[in-house]
Image (cartoon, rainbow, N blue to C red):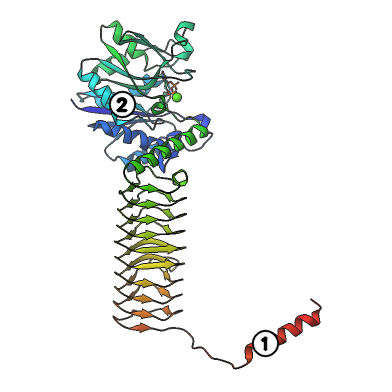
């Protein structure tokens, strides 16, 4: 049976106190909504519908970028969760299969949990609700059960004291056959404490019709929804703790794991070594045996097997290091290929460039890639030796096994095997240093310190 997703993302999230729609606030470098969509991807959905409202344009732009096939529908006014799902009705007119509803502000629903809900559907239950034992049930909807069946869901605002004493709560995630779900939703009213159309009412309606509703439970942490900056920070910490554990379980050494920060999509092969205070932005892939030393910042880059980076290095988008390449301290690499065994060990900027195999880039080398309007490329051939403090005025090419003398400003291509020298010649003035010092000291003494 095929599956589909509805992701609710219309809410304002007033407690964030932000101009940015709540679901666009980021955990581990990705918007909450993208985390929710990635969770839902575990169902391999044939259709994904995102319900937008507050900040719809910004939210839709993120959806279009992350999942171009997803459909966005707008909920002009937020009249409740059932009303929100109802906006997706037309998008499902021709759909046969199950629909699972997720919230765009709930980033941690696991693949395993969704699979268990799916399995329960296959076993014949009509409506499956994801519940959890709440440490502090507060304003969560309460799940009223009778043995293994779920009778109804009561929102905290509408609950009587006995119902309020229930600790089994509604996560908001619900799965049902598409047609069943929309039929039930069309019967949901808004005669309740909030005057809202509650999605949770579909459970009571299903039971009345003789259908079977059931609960699948998961750990409370999975159901964490983000409503405030404090909860956003908590979600970040939970994500980081899990990412660190997963990396270590996968064979990666994290030296000082608490200070290493991952992105939602960081990929590190076993036997890589990561030092303290390393931060991974989005789009990083690290191969086996690579070492990323302390205080390095990496983003949108690929670090090949046995390459070394840092300490204090910055790899920006498009940096690609081949086998055994070395990037040392205070070096920035952007949109550049560093071939096998090449070294850029100290204080350099290499941008929009290619550096050939086994080339050696001296301290203080800068590719001058930007003329104020356009970017230009620098190509450095294999086994080239770039002297310290070389400026390469792009576009420019240095051939294989070519060299530059230290301090050279390279303004034209250097042929294979050639040496470029472009600097003023040194003139020695005998005795001048001593004389100058005496002069200056005398001047200072006269001034009386
Ligand atoms: C909802 C559930 C409650 C559950 C809780 C879990 C209902 C009636 N109640 O309550 O049982 O315990 O979630 O967190 O479903 N949204 C829209 N449009 C709307 C209303 C909401 O898109 O008109 C979105 C929100 O942006 C949010 C999600 O739906 O992502 C849940 O809405 P919210 O108002 O937070 O529901 P709760 O009152 O927390
Ligand atoms: Ca909520």
Mark found first going from the N terminus, 2 or 1: 2
Viewport quadrant of the C terminus: bottom right
- State the image quarter where residue 154 is shown: top left
Quadrant of image for the N terminus: top left
Image position of 339 (left or right of 262): left
Please determine whether, in this image, residue 249 is positioned above or below residue 153: below
Q: Secondary structure at mark 1?
A: helix
- Where 199 falls versus 402 (above or below)? above
| Label 2 SS | helix
Q: Height in image: 188 above or below 292?
A: above
Residue 91 in view (yes/no): no
User: Is residue 291 or residue 443 the one in the foreground?
Assistant: 291
* Image quarter for ligand 1: top left
On the picture, is 331 further left or further right than 98?
right
Residue 87 is situated, as x and y percent measured from the top left of the image, at 33, 24
Q: Specify whether residue 80 is in view.
A: yes
User: How dense is the environment of label 1, judged by Cα within 10 Å: few (below 14), some, or many (20 and up)?
Assistant: few
**Beta carbon of the mark 2 residue lies under 8 A of ligand 1:** no
- Work out whether residue 354 or residue 65 is closer to the camera in this orientation and state it: 354
Q: Which mark is residue 349?
A: none
Could you tell me which residue is drawn at 46 percent across and 50 percent down?
A: 276
Question: Which residue lies at the image location 55% right of the left edge and 91% below the top edge?
Answer: 428
What count of labels does the image hold?
2
Depth order, front residue of 54/278:
278
Where does label 2 land, which residue?
Answer: 113
Q: Is mark 1 within 8 Å of ligand 1?
A: no
Q: Position of residue 210 (x, y in %)?
A: 25, 6
| Picture disc at residue 436 | 1
């Amino acid at each position: 049976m095929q599956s589909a997703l509805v992701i609710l993302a219309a809410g304002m999230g007033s407690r964030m106190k932000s101009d940015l729609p709540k679901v666009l606030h980021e955990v581990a470098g990705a918007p909450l909504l993208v985390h929710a969509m990635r969770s839902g991807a575990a169902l391999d959905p044939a259709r994904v519908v995102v319900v937008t409202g507050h900040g719809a344009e910004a939210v839709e732009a993120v959806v279009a970028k992350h999942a171009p096939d997803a459909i966005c529908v707008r909920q002009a006014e937020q009249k409740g969760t059932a009303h929100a799902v109802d906006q997706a009705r037309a998008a499902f007119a021709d759909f046969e299969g199950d629909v699972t509803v997720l919230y765009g502000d709930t980033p941690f629903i696991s693949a395993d949990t969704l699979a268990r809900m799916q399995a329960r559907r296959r076993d014949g239950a009509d409506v499956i609700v994801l519940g959890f034992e709440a440490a502090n049930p507060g304003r969560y909807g309460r799940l009223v059960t009778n043995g293994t069946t779920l009778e109804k869901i009561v929102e905290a605002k509408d609950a009587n004291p006995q119902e309020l004493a229930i600790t089994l709560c509604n996560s908001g995630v619900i799965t049902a056959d598409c047609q069943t779900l929309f039929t039930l939703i069309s019967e949901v009213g808004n005669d309740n404490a909030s005057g809202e159309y509650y999605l949770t009412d579909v459970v009571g309606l299903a039971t009345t019709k003789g259908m079977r509703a059931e609960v699948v439970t998961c750990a409370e942490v999975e159901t964490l929804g983000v409503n405030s900056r404090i909860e956003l920070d908590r979600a970040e910490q939970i994500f980081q703790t899990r990412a660190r554990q997963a990396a270590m379980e996968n064979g990666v050494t994290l030296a000082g794991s608490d200070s290493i920060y991952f992105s939602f999509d960081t990929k590190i092969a076993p036997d890589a070594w990561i030092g303290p205070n390393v931060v991974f932005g989005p789009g990083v892939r690290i191969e086996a045996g690579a070492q990323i030393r302390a205080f390095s910042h990496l983003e949108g880059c690929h670090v090949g097997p046995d390459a070394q980076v840092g300490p204090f290095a910055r790899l920006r988008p498009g940096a690609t290091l081949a086998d055994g390449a070395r990037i040392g301290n205070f070096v920035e690499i952007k949109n550049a290929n560093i071939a096998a065994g090449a070294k850029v060990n100290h204080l350099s900027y290499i941008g929009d460039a290619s550096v050939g195999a086994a080339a050696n880039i001296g301290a203080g080398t800068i590719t001058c890639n930007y003329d104020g309007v356009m970017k230009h490329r620098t190509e450095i051939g294999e086994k080239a030796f770039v002297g310290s403090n070389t400026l390469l005025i792009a576009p420019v090419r240095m051939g294989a096994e070519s060299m530059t003398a230290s301090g050279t400003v390279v303004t034209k291509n250097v042929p294979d095997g050639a040496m470029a020298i472009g600097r003023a010649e040194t003139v020695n003035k005998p005795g001048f240093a001593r004389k100058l010092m005496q002069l200056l000291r005398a001047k200072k003494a006269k001034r009386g310190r």
